[in-house]
Image: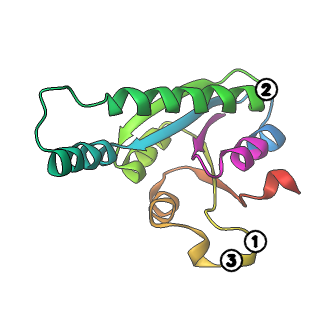
Amino acid sequence: MRVLVWIVEETWRATVAAAAAFLPADADVTLLHVRQSDAETVARSARYALLGRSRRPAEPLDAISEQSARELLAEAQAVLGRDAALGARSGRIEYEVVTAAGAADLLVLAREKDRAHRGPRSLGPAARYVVDHVPCAVLLVWPDASSG
């Protein structure tokens, strides 16, 4: 079984806890983090608009973002407690997750709201798109699942 675990900063602990609890020991697990690529573009544009064009190079936002993703994935793998492939992508989040899930049998992801906010709005736009478009089974967990 090939499993893709979608790691998001706010909810990754619940997603990893669900993967650890429900996946068989022989599952081929990939932890995936996708960073929104246009965030760096917006930040770079704001810098130029507010401060004018400078001869100093801009802070390497892409490098900082990539390092943060690597650290998050490494921490998630440690919490998972088993070997997993680590995938870091950049782009439109929902498209990247759907593309990565094309090779998976199961996608594990968390809702964006807690149990007090049940219903369709417990999924944000990216998660809703992913759930509606992935070609594999989906394990959808509550973000507070790891705490009880």
Say what amino acid the circle numbered 3 marks. Answer: His
Q: Earlier in the sequence, mark 2 or mark 1?
A: 2
The one of 31 and 3 positioned closer to us in this rendering: 31
Callout 2 touching callout 1 (CB < 8 Å): no
Who comes first in sequence, dot 2 or dot 3?
Answer: 2
Residue 10 x, y percent position in the rendering: 62, 51
Query: Looking at the image, which residue is at 63% across and 62% down?
Result: 111
Q: Check the image and name the residue furthest to the right.
A: 148
Determine contact: label 3, label 1, CB under 8 Å.
Answer: yes
**Image location of residue 62, percent across then percent down:** 34, 31
**Residue of label 3:** 117
64 within the magenta span? no
CB of mark 2 within 8 Å of CB of mark 3? no
Q: Closest to the observer: 70 or 83?
A: 70
For numbered disc 3, what is the local secondary structure? helix
Q: In the rendered view, would you say 30 is above or below 17?
A: above
State how far apart marks 2 and 3 are (Cα). Answer: 30 Å
Type of amino acid under label 1: Arg
Residue neighbourhood size for the residue with mark 3, other residues' Cα within 10 Å, grouped as few (<14), some (14–19), many (≥20): few
Q: Which mark is drawn over residue 141?
A: none
Q: Which residue is denoted by mark 1 in the rendering?
A: 115
Q: Which residue is mark 2?
A: 81
Residue range in magenta is: 1-18
Residue 76 appears in which quarter of the rendering?
top right
Where is residue 102 shown, x and y percent of the image?
Answer: 46, 42
Residue 92 image position (x, y, % from top left): 34, 49
Query: Cα distance, mark 2 to mark 1?
Result: 27 Å
Query: Which of the 4 image quadrants contains residue 61?
Result: top left
> Could you tell me which quadrant the C terminus lies in?
bottom right
Q: How many marks?
A: 3
Residue extending furthest toward the top: 83
